[in-house]
Image: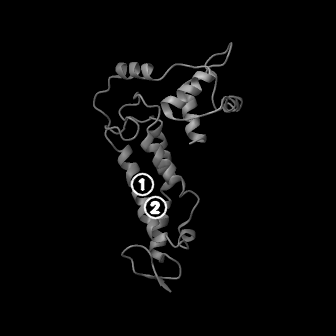
Amino acid sequence: MTICTTTDCGNETSTYLCGQCVNDLQLWLDKVTETRQMLFTTMAKLDNTGPKNSEGGGGGSTGSAMPLREGAMDLRYALAIWLGHTAKDLARDPHAGGFLEEIKTLIDRAFELVDLPPEETIDHEAARARLQAEVPGPLRPKPLLEYLKVAHGIELKESLLRKWASRKLITRANTDGYPTYDPTVVLIQARKEVM
């Protein structure tokens, strides 16, 4: 028998977590999937909340200039490492004592990010004008790839765009001539697969 590695626990255990800490960890692990779904809504700006400072991709209304809320996306990725794990399996890890606090912190941060009250007044016209000024309309592949590289630091190959289009993960913005694609749609797909 050893002592549970959770801070301030002190219970005896045959693994690195005692039975009570395993139960507590499992309760928090069970919240991960739901929290990630909630963060997707915030990340994609499908809700009416957002940070009022620059943290999280510019914040503000759903018409803000950034295509995604970075803070929500980062938290989703951080929570993804906990998917598919059970507390009993994690109890065998020598670092298990810190897992509960780490998951709790991530989930608490997620709720802080999405539980902000909506802004009282939203100037939709100004938001739309800012979006049109900062995000170009449909572009041909080469200018689109250059825009993603310069504006978002994402480097893609034209062959990947064609692959996504053939798999219907992105769609053409036009029907005739050389294909054009909406930069926002391509950015969302790129963040899903490349980042």
Above or below residue 107? Residue 73 is above
Viewer-nearest residue: 193 or 120: 193
Q: Secondary structure at mark 1?
A: helix
Mark 2: amino acid = Trp
Above or below residue 175? Residue 106 is below
Using the rendered view, name the quadrant where residue 148 is placed.
Answer: top right
Q: Secondary structure at mark 2?
A: helix
The residue that disc 1 covers is: 107
**Circle 1/circle 2 CB separation < 8 Å:** yes
On the rendered structure, is 113 left or right of 191? left
Q: Which mark is residue 28?
A: 2
On the rendered structure, is 187 left or right of 157? left
Give percent across and percent down for residue 78. Answer: 49, 52
Above or below residue 48? Residue 2 is below
Above or below residue 136? Residue 187 is below
Q: Which residue ends up furthest to the left in the rendered image? A: 120
Give percent across and percent down for residue 37. Answer: 50, 46
Name which residue lies at 57% across and 40% down: 192
Reading the chain from its start, which is encountered first: label 1 or label 2?
2
Give percent across and percent down for residue 21. Answer: 45, 72
Mark 1: amino acid = Ile
Name which residue lies at 61% across and 33% down: 156
Q: Which mark is residue 39?
A: none
Looking at the rendered image, the quarter that the C terminus falls into is top right
Give percent across and percent down for residue 129. Answer: 39, 18
Name which residue lies at 58% across and 36% down: 190
On the rendered structure, is 13 left or right of 109? right
Asked whether residue 77 is in view, the answer is yes
